[in-house]
Image (tube, rainbow, N blue to C red):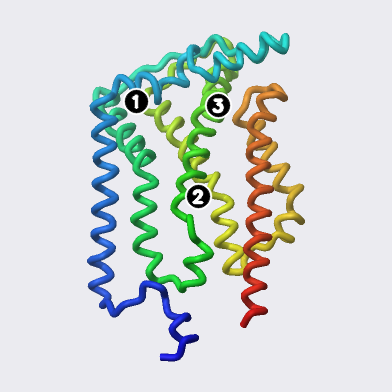
Amino acid sequence: MPLDQEEDKPAGEKEMSFLDHLEELRWHIIKSAIAILVFSIAAFILKDFFFGEVLLGPAKPSFITYRLFCQLGDYLGSPALCIDKLNFILQSRQMSGQFAMHITGSVVIGLVCAFPYVFFQVWKFVSPGLYPKERKATRGAVFWVSFLFLIGVLFGYFLVTPLSVNFLANYTVDPSITNQFDITSYISTVVMLVLACGLMFQLPIAVFVLTKIGVVTPAFMREYRRHAIIVILVVAAVITPPDIFSQLLVTFPLYALYEVSIFVSAYELRRLKKQELEL
């Protein structure tokens, strides 16, 4: 076989039937499921920490984010930044409510903790079908996807979630209405916010892939930068208390993420053009 044809072959190409591919995929799924199960069982057993301190943390005024805001408010002479009271109580209105919450929360924690390994298994299944140049261009994919997901989860848990909980807890249409949240509603809200931020921080990776297939360009992202800023400001205004400082705390990281995505798109576009010139 000519050398150029050999280089055009996928790096891990080998003769495999459709059933062989299914069998390989099955084992990757089994390994991922086992990893999620192990972490879920650990979270289920260590409920005092994972639920009392982690999932229920943003529901307590002693949460680290609230304490840091109070310290910052004292330093800046702005008492409005201090969050020392949350006007709601948590309760379980269904007989199986706490048990269902325990199971659901454990699975979510297991998924978050096992995410790097799960993506590693997905990548092991996909990467053999890539060409050598594609594998070189996507080197470090497991690290960067896992790293961005972790940063997004931390951003969602320590900033977006407590600000959102504080906003929803203190939002009232009439003073006569008392906020009494069901535990399953609270847990689902926390999980949604944290996972949404984890996925949102995959924006640079998504832009990289979309640039590679020709859907997105850095020029397109620069052209619609103002629109993106407006969307970011609206999102920040919705999920934060009505003060400019809290809104900026959410706005700046999201905008920085957008700018990083433009850089990633420009880098990938230059690399693709260089490849075309070498052909």
Q: Is residue 213 left or right of residue 47?
A: right
Label 3 with label 1: CB-CB less than 8 Å? no
Q: Mark 3 = which residue?
A: 164
Q: Mark 1 = which residue?
A: 50
x and y, in percent, of residue 93 in the image: 32, 21
| Position of the C terminus by quadrant | bottom right
For the residue labelled by badge 2, is the local secondary structure a helix, a strand or a loop? helix
- Labelled disc at residue 273: none
> Considering only vertical position in the picture, is 144 above or below 167?
below
- The span from disc 2 to disc 3 (Cα, nearest Å) is 28 Å
User: Going 75% across and 55% down the picture, which residue do you hit?
Assistant: 222
x and y, in percent, of residue 252 in the image: 68, 36
Count neighbours of disc 1 (C-alpha within 10 A) and say few if under 14, some if 14 to 19, many if 20 or more. some
Q: Amino acid at mark 3?
A: Ser
User: Going 73% across and 48% down the picture, which residue do you hit?
Assistant: 227
Q: Amino acid at mark 1?
A: Phe
- The span from disc 2 to disc 1 (Cα, nearest Å) is 26 Å
Residue depth check, mark 2 versus mark 1: number of the one nearer the observer: 2
- The span from disc 3 to disc 1 (Cα, nearest Å) is 20 Å
> Considering only vertical position in the picture, is 31 above or below 138?
above
Where is residue 109, by image quadrant? Answer: top left
x and y, in percent, of residue 193 in the image: 49, 35
For the residue labelled by badge 3, is the local secondary structure a helix, a strand or a loop? helix
Q: Earlier in the sequence, mark 2 or mark 1?
A: 1
- Labelled disc at residue 144: 2
Q: Amino acid at mark 2?
A: Trp
Q: Is residue 273 left or right of residue 30?
A: right
Residue that extends furthest to the bottom in the rendered view of this protein = 1
Q: Earlier in the sequence, mark 3 or mark 1?
A: 1
User: Going 69% across and 11% down the picture, which residue do you hit?
Assistant: 75
